Amino acid sequence: MVLIEVFQMLCPGCVNHSLPQAVKIHRKVEESALQVIGLHSVFEHHEVMTPAALKVFMSEFGITFPVAVDRPREGQRIPSTMKKYRLEGTPSTILVDKKGRIRQVQFGQVDDFVLGLLIGSLLSEED
C-alpha cells in the first residue's frame, strides 16, 4: 500500500498539517505494510522552488521518506501528475491499495482519525 502526499513548500496547509502527518505515519507504520512517498508539485512561485531549496526543506522538516518532483508541462502552470490525476491543489493525499489501485484522493487537510481509518481499512483488505 502507498500513501502519496502531494505538497508544495510554500503551502501553509502542507507545512502545518499534511507533511507532519505524513512524517508521523512514515515513522509509525511498518514500511512493509505502507510506503509513504512525497510529491513536490510546483504550480506557482517556480523561481524559488529549486531542488536545493527542497533538499533544505526536507532536512528542516524531518522528511525522510522519498520525495519525487512533479514534472512541469511546457507553457503550462499545472505540472504533469497534478494534471493527470486532476488534483485540485495542495495538500492532496492519495491512497493506493495493495493491488496498485488508487482508492482515495483527498484535497485539503485530512483529519488524523479519518486518515487512520482509511489506511487501516485498506491494510486489512486481503492481497
Image (cartoon, rainbow, N blue to C red):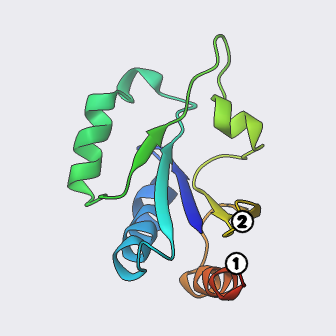
Q: Are marks 2 and 1 in contact (CB under 8 Å)?
A: yes
Image location (x, y in percent) of residue 83: 73, 34
Quadrant of image for the C terminus? bottom right
Image location (x, y in percent) of residue 102: 74, 60
The answer to whether 11 appears left or right of 76 in the picture is left
Residue at 62 percent across and 87 percent down: it is 120
| Closer to us: 22 or 76 | 22
Question: The residue tagged with tag 1: helix, strand or loop?
Answer: loop
Quadrant of image for the N terminus? bottom right
Residue at 58 percent across and 88 percent down: it is 113
- Residue assigned mark 2: 99
Residue at 29 percent across and 50 percent down: it is 58
The answer to whether 1 appears left or right of 48 in the picture is right
Q: Is residue 65 above or below residue 126?
A: above
- Residue assigned mark 1: 127
At label 2, counting other C-alpha atoms closer than 10 Å, the crowd grade (few under 14, some 14-19, many 20 or more) is: few
Q: Residue furthest front?
A: 127
**Type of amino acid under label 1:** Asp
**Type of amino acid under label 2:** Lys
Question: The residue tagged with tag 2: helix, strand or loop?
Answer: loop
Image location (x, y in percent) of residue 60: 21, 53
